Image (cartoon, helix red, strand yellow):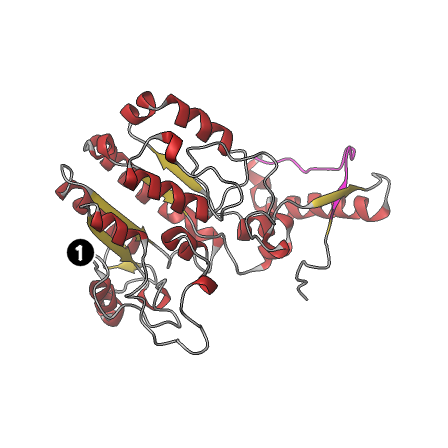
Amino acid sequence: PNLVALLSGKFPADLPWNSSTDEDKPFDEYKFIWKKAAKKGCRTLFAEDAPKLALFNYLKGGFHKQPTDYYPRPFHIALDQEESVRQKFYCVGDRHESEITLSYLFDYMDAFKDRPHFAFTFNTRLTHDDINLAGVADNIYLKFLKRIKHSGNLNNSLVLFFSDHGIRYGDIRQANIGKLEERLPFIYWIFPKWFLKKHPEIVHNLKINKHRLSTPFDVHETLQNILTDGPLESYTSDPNKKGMSLFKVIPETRTCEDVGILPHWCTCQNTKSVSITDTTVKQVANFTISTINKDLSHLRNSNLCAILSLDKITKAEMFVSTKDILKYD
């Protein structure tokens, strides 16, 4: 749902597509953002790893026609079918699959350095099922970002580095941090330095908005603004619309209900104070410390970690669920 909103500016339910009756119906007719970029004269790229989990192919009809100028899906299907090159689940030969996708993206950006271009690249396989594997790609993404910086490609490109959601599997979802992880995708906007100097008002508004409630609909609206390249005054600032430009200030009073986020997915949660002398609070605190000591026990012989003990509890809060929050067994 998040990526459909980002790419089309619509909820999946708003599209003329029904998951129960149109499972094999292709998405060729829908007006995704790359079509608008193409009309503005941009070359376009859409690349994903893990073809079986692909955004428009998993339990869906995909595309019958190539959706963008560059679309390496056949290449990734071939990699999945050729077991001899799969050394590990996420490796192809001696290369990480994410590295291959990002290398293709760099070559694309470099080839069209002096021409308008749009690229949407999405890596899924590594982090889809295991929260601990994200760190495996740290150096791969760092290397890619350094390459596009040193090559000069950042001088004329806006780069969005983002996720569609956090981990949705495993025990971490039972903890509050896991609930936030599932509901709060990250996004970083990397602008050319000249753009930031030319548009100080936009910079000011973005700094405010990073502390406001924003959604993929806002990202879509902002991309529309960039493609239109109109004056700041023309950008959408109506808080009653599904999406508003992130180049304009988002109201501080904006709520999940305002933007169509269901209560179950809203992270603006209510809390209530709990007495620090409560028996359960003490049990939770002691259990937490005991777990940390257990996890660090293998380092004790090297004198790296002391045995922790509870000193005092200064504050305790409990999240309050509403009837609209889905419960898990």
Residue 138 or 305: which is nearer the viewer? 138
The answer to whether residue 95 of the structure is visible from this angle is no
Amino acid type of the residue that numbered disc 1 sits on in the rendered structure: Asp
At 62% from the left and 56% from the top, the residue drawn is: 264
At 66% from the left and 48% from the top, the residue drawn is: 291
Q: Which region is colored magenta?
A: 304-319
At 51% from the left and 35% from the top, the residue drawn is: 250
Residue 197, relative to residue 2: is it above or below? above
Q: Position of residue 188 (x, y in %)?
A: 40, 38
Query: Element type at marker 1?
Result: loop
Q: Position of residue 263 (x, y in %)?
A: 63, 54
Residue 164, relative to residue 327: is it above or below? above
Q: Position of residue 114 (x, y in %)?
A: 13, 36
Residue 152 or 243: which is nearer the viewer? 243
Magenta stretch encompasses residue 3: no
Residue to which mark 1 is pinned: 69
